Amino acid sequence: MKIGLALLNRNEVEALPHFLAKLDVSNFDAVFVVDGGSTDGSREVLLHNHLKVIDQESKGRGQAFSIAFQEAKRLELDALVFISTDGNEDPSDLPKFIQGILNGFELVIASRMLPDSRNEEDDSIFRPRKAANKVFAYIAFFMFSNGSPRLTDPINGYRAMSLDAWNKMDLDYSGYDIEFATSIQAYRLGMKVLEFPTFEGDRLGGESGARALPTTLAMLRVLNRMRKLEKKHVKRF
């Protein structure tokens, strides 16, 4: 079983020194970066640290996933772990992803919603993003779970996936909706999914590309598209 690590980067020059200092890649068979058009010098920092950088010509996290899996296929990898370079995902979790894949799980998610986990809003009085994530998690479960255990954080991007699972999902989402879509497809296809609690820290620099309103609308579109797929599936049988 060959497992690769895909770093997703876009304009994170402030976070990279701290992130790279904590990153241990010794247990991976391949490591590479998908860079979404950085203009702040972060691409050069990554190259200086001897990391392979693949340039992403069109924006979108879903596009980054697609590019990463194309590279994984070229390298004959069996699975990928995805981590962002903004510093709020804990690199000490990486061995848990590897172990989950080795134990036969097709999708492994670091959950910010399980007991003993931390969400970036947990220190705030108002937690709108966390509340929205929980709502979408419950909606996805009730609409698509087909008896599978409930996923607590189907939207989080800190995750690992086998190439076989990615190919079976057959998705064409280009933006931040990709994680939600893959989680729902895992429900629909009855895939073996593992969640474990993670500690989400604060961003170390840069700005998040996931704006609240556009991201919410994207999640609603995912639910609608998946609902239509379910209807087609039911009609065939």
Image: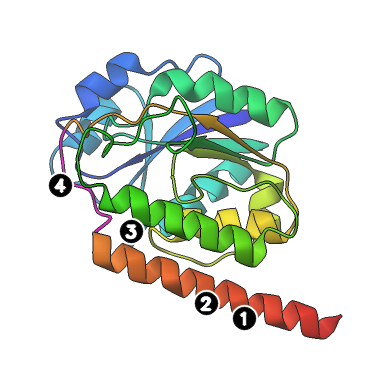
Residue situated furthest front in the rendering: 125
Instruction: Give the distance between the C-alpha atoms of the residues marked 1 and 2, in whole angstroms.
Output: 6 Å
For label 3, the residue is 57
Determine contact: label 1, label 3, CB under 8 Å.
Answer: no
| Numbered mark located on residue 224 in the image | 2
Under tag 2, what secondary structure? helix
Q: How many marks?
A: 4
Determine contact: label 2, label 4, CB under 8 Å.
Answer: no
The residue shown at (23%, 20%) is: 18
Instruction: Give the distance between the C-alpha atoms of the residues marked 2 and 4, in whole angstroms.
Output: 35 Å
Main SS of residues in magenta: loop
For label 1, the residue is 228
Task: Give the quarter of the figure containing the C terminus.
Answer: bottom right
Q: Residue 226: give x, y in percent of width and height.
A: 59, 72
Q: Residue 159: give x, y in percent of width and height.
A: 51, 39
From the viewer's perspective, is 179 left or right of 101? left
Q: Earlier in the sequence, mark 4 or mark 1?
A: 4
Residue 170 appearing in the image: no
Q: Earlier in the sequence, mark 1 or mark 3?
A: 3
Q: Where is residue 20, by image quadrant?
A: top left
